[in-house]
Amino acid sequence: MEQTRQIIYYKNYFFKFFDKQTDKVKIKIDQVLFVITVADRIPKKFFDHMTGTDGLYEVRIELGSNIFRVFCCFDEGNIIVLFNGFQKKTQKTPQSEIDRALRIKKEYFDEKLKNEGHENKRKGK
């Protein structure tokens, strides 16, 4: 299968979540992330836009009755940047988790813009 999207991990936010999971959950997360990288159209079951969040998406992982979410966004077309993850215990996604993901997203793009500015200075632009 050919990769249609690339996944990158911003800092260690995702890994702090991932490392706390059981081996079965880690395997399921890896399977879902693989589908996201190779599927022409990602099934909504695994990936969806968070309404009203200005470009925030969630990776959806289910294992038995356990539900997990990993927030992310797109960057430069087919690059998906993973942020924080959590186990969903209620029907509604906690606002605190959404707010955290939005802060991380802002941090990511602010840092990227700053780094691009430094790169342009080094090139004499």
Image (cartoon, rainbow, N blue to C red):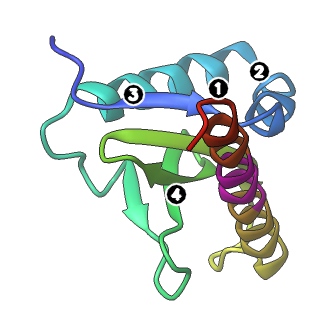
Residue 19's spot in the image, x, y percent?
83, 22
Q: Earlier in the sequence, mark 4 or mark 2?
A: 2
Q: Which residue is mark 3?
A: 6
Amino acid marked by disc 1: Val
Residue 62 visible to an observer of this rendering: no
Give the foreground label among 3 and 4: 3
Name the residue rendered at 61%, 37% in the picture: 124
Amino acid marked by disc 4: Glu
| Alpha carbon distance from label 2 to label 1 | 5 Å
Helix, strand or loop at disc 2?
loop
| Alpha carbon distance from label 4 to label 1 | 17 Å
Q: Does the residue at mark 3 contact the one at mark 4 (Cβ under 8 Å)?
A: no
Name the residue rendered at 55%, 42% in the picture: 81
Closer to us: 90 or 17: 17
Helix, strand or loop at disc 4?
strand
Q: Earlier in the sequence, mark 1 or mark 3?
A: 3
Q: Which residue is mark 1?
A: 25
Name the residue rendered at 78%, 27% in the picture: 15
Closer to us: 31 or 52: 52
Give the foreground label among 3 and 2: 3
Closer to us: 81 or 39: 81
| Alpha carbon distance from label 3 to label 4 | 16 Å
Closer to us: 98 or 67: 98
Q: Which residue is mark 4?
A: 58
| Alpha carbon distance from label 1 to label 3 | 21 Å
Helix, strand or loop at disc 3?
strand
Main SS of the magenta part reads helix
Q: Which mark is residue 22?
A: 2
Q: Is 51 part of what is drawn in magenta?
A: no
